[in-house]
Amino acid sequence: MRKSKLQRIKDKFYWEEEAKKMKPLLNSYGLYRMGLTSAEIEDYIKARGNTLNIKKLMKKFDDICGCNTMAMTPTGECLMYRSDVERFADVLFYGTPTFFD
């Protein structure tokens, strides 16, 4: 049977159960060691939100992130640190309070 696009995205991640909810793990995901590209963050939000329609979720995620410290690739692409992606997504999906740099 052929997998849906959303299922193929979800299959990129290892998953853990947290508070009786499944959550994709970020520690072994992504092309770069230092963090995630914007496309990888979008895949994470799609997997975690269980939807391909993430326009509103990404707008909220970007509002939560605000101005943030990031790493850079040799080509100049910005990378958001995995811990930041996870804690901002926790605010988005769970309403978990967070600290800001």
Image (cartoon, helix red, strand yellow):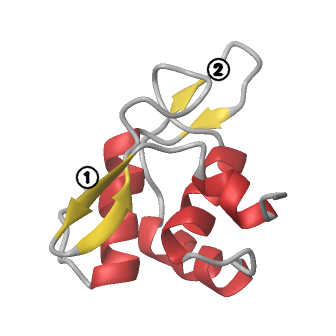
In the image, taking residue 26 as reference, residue 62 lies left or right, namely right
Give the CA separation, mark 2 to mark 1.
21 Å
Depth check, front residue: 23 or 83: 23
In the drawing, what numbered circle is on residue 73?
2
Q: Position of residue 28 (x, y in %)?
A: 42, 29
The quadrant in which residue 47 appears is bottom right
Q: Position of residue 77 (x, y in %)?
A: 71, 31
Residue at image x 47%, y 58%?
A: 67
Q: Nearer the viewer, mark 2 or mark 1?
A: 2
Q: Position of residue 34 (x, y in %)?
A: 46, 24
Residue at image x 49%, y 68%?
A: 48
30 vs 82: above or below:
above
Q: Residues within 10 Å of mark 2 (few under 14, many from 20)?
A: few
63 vs 6: above or below:
below
In the image, taking residue 14 as reference, residue 46 lies left or right, namely right
61 vs 11: above or below:
below
Residue at image x 17%, y 77%?
A: 97
Numbered disc 2: secondary structure? loop
Name the residue beneath numbered marker 1.
101
Numbered disc 1: secondary structure? loop
Q: Quadrant of the N terminus?
A: bottom right
* Mark before the other along the chain sequence, 2 or 1: 2
The amino acid beneath tag 1 is: Asp
Which residue is at the far top?
Answer: 74
Depth check, front residue: 65 or 48: 48
Residue at image x 50%, y 34%?
A: 29
Marks 2 and 1: CB-CB under 8 Å?
Answer: no
